[in-house]
Image: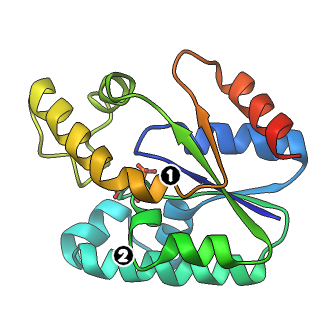
């Protein structure tokens, strides 16, 4: 089975994904890391030199490759992956895949992202916390319909990472 972790930037997809992979004895991959290794460039550099459309096409291509070739994998997706190119349907229609939405509130996301903007091209330019809060609020509203297509949603506010991983295993297996 390929368990796809989806959710907004900084919702804990990679951290929780690694814990889950350990618990389940699955392999773990982060789609952004995979794209970077295949493209020999950081996500930030891809956005800068080739543009977002190139990145979104590459993201879909590598997602498809992984869905077709892997087994027993925890795959942490980028925050935008479910929202482009029919990617969410691709996951849900694939025989061997599931999607879990790690849902975090706007204040939690703002708190985490305000110190982690630099490697995230979509928010790197935002200077004030107020503007960041407004941006995330609108962006999350646009993306929620895609995230809400997940097979399972886990709320993550005020929960420890291991606790979230345990809840996910309880609900899915
Ligand atoms: C993006 C999220 C990033 C990365 C890219 C675009 C997005 O991944 O894929 O910067 O559109 O939300 P993380 O969610 O791992 O930060």
Q: Earlier in the sequence, mark 1 or mark 2?
A: 2
Is 17 placed above or below 77 here?
above
Mark 1 Cα within 10 Å, few/some/many (few <14, many 20+)? some
Residue 26 occupies quadrant: bottom right
Question: Regarding ligand 1, which quadrant of the image does it lie in?
Answer: bottom left
Is 50 placed above or below 2 here?
below
- Residue occupying the point 38% across, 64% down: 42
73 sits left or right of 81 in the view = right
Residue 116 occupies quadrant: top left
Residue annotated with mark 2: 56
**Which quarter of the image is occupied by the N terminus?**
bottom right
156 sits left or right of 48 in the view = right
Between residues 172 and 62, which one lies in front from this camera angle? 172
Mark 1 residue element = loop
Residue annotated with mark 1: 148
- Residue occupying the point 56% across, 27% down: 156
Is 109 placed above or below 61 here?
above
Query: Horizontal and vertical percent for residue 30?
Result: 59, 57
């Amino acid at each position: 089975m390929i368990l796809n972790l989806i959710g907004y930037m900084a919702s804990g997809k990679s951290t929780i994904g690694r814990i889950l992979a350990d618990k389940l004895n699955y392999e773990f991959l982060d789609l952004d890391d995979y794209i970077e290794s295949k493209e020999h460039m950081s996500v930030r550099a891809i956005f800068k030199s080739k543009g977002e459309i190139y990145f979104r096409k590459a993201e879909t291509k590598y997602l498809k490759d992984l869905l077709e070739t892997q087994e027993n994998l925890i795959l942490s997706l980028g925050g935008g992956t479910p929202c482009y190119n029919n990617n969410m349907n691709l996951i849900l229609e694939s025989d061997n895949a599931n999607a879990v939405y790690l849902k975090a509130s706007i204040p939690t996301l703002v708190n985490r992202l305000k110190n982690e903007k630099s490697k995230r091209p979509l928010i790197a330019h935002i200077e004030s916390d107020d503007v960041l809060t407004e941006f995330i609020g609108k962006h999350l509203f646009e993306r929620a319909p895609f995230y809400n297509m997940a097979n399972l949603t886990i709320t993550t506010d005020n929960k420890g990472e291991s606790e979230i991983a345990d809840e996910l295993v309880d609900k899915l297996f």
